[in-house]
Image (spheres, rainbow, N blue to C red):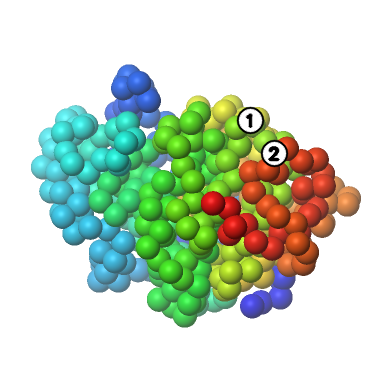
Amino acid sequence: MRERGAVSTLDVVLQQDIRGELPLILDRHGNRIPCNETEARIAHLAEGLGRVPGVRFGAPAAGDTELDAAIHAVHDAEYLAFLEQSSASLPEGEMLLLDHPYLPKDIAADTPIIGGIHHTARESARTAVSAAHLAARSGGMSYALCRPPGHHAGRAFLGGHCYINNGVLALQTMMRYGHERVGLIDFDIHFGNGSSALIEGMPNAFFGSVHGATDISYPYVPTSPPNRRQAFVPFSVPPSPQEFVAAVAGLVRSALASGCTALVVSAGYDVVADDPHGIWTLDPSVLSEIGMVFAHAGVPICVVQEGGYNPERLAACAFHFASGLLCVAERPAGHQAAHDVHATGHHPYGSDLLHEDAHAARYSPVTDSLNQA
Ligand SMILES: [Zn+2]
């Protein structure tokens, strides 16, 4: 474990080929709506990251052999073959919507397959694998700036703009490079159903998720942790900044308490106000506090880009999060305690946070959120 908060460099791995946008997605009622998961997201995010001292950009280094081994370790071979073949055979302008078996069970189908999307998703995965390798090797922090996102993709299903699960690929990469137990902390507003399903069968992985309650947010089905290695903090109403930071800090503490020596972060900026796919009211500046929470974990960290769809907010979100990770953010006096994820104590933690005094919850140490059913 490195010294807390001592990292001065954030290695941003920038996806090289980001081409290809979905012409539409379906809403929960099956209506066709515009897709906001655009190529331009990457430029906005890079602009915000580039303003932070200590951010260093590089290209993905993972070769095809390492990448394909990593993808096949996470996803079903027939699903991957289907994705590749359908993506390669679709003429420009055509798409495959629902006429295939690789849809998540009980969840409304929303994500088409278009020509070339397998290639772009594969390059997104290459970015995540490369970033994870970098953080595991350096012991520091990396950031996979990639699209499309991945946390809704399961072993043999796609959905929610996701085809290949970049976060779980990153987690397994950190395991391959020396970390026996790795945690994946997901703070996208949408529950990472694909990540949860994949990690359910991984005894050395921890999954913690802060998200909008899933009866009112995607995937619009009831969810609960499948075992003691997963912990969820769903919010039925938009969280205050203090509640959001406390929830993420609690999950990081749980991951560390369960023996994780490295973390992957599924970073979703659809948690801020005015996101076209979000319903929360947070200001982008809250992400600097979230970044500090992870910086104080004192373990190698690989951030993987998930959602965040408001082009006018993405640069600010990335700027604040990276500023927090590198501990160069302006911090209000008296806020330090919220980031100390190494405090000890016996405060039970869970969705009952919502019914407690937010200030008290924020400063209460969390030792075991694994007891949530
Ligand atoms: Zn999302």
The residue lying at 71 percent from left, 75 percent from top is 3
- Residue type at mark 2 is Leu
Tell me if the residue at label 2 has its CB under 8 Å from ligand 1: no
Question: Who is closer to the viewer here, 228 or 338?
Answer: 228
- Residue type at mark 1 is Val
The residue lying at 46 percent from left, 42 percent from top is 223
Q: Which residue is mark 2?
A: 354
Among numbered discs 1 and 2, the one appearing first in the sequence: 1
Gap in angstroms between the C-alphas marked 1 and 2: 9 Å
In the depicted structure, whether residue 25 falls above or below residue 256? above
Percent across and percent down for residue 280 are 61, 31
The residue lying at 11 percent from left, 42 percent from top is 89
- Which type of secondary structure does the marked residue at label 2 adopt? helix
The crowding category of the residue bearing disc 1, from other C-alpha atoms within 10 Å (few below 14, some 14 to 19, many at least 20), is few
Would you say the residues marked 1 and 2 are in contact, meaning their CB atoms lie under 8 Å apart? yes
- Where on the picture, by quarter, is residue 203? bottom left
Q: Which residue is mark 1?
A: 237
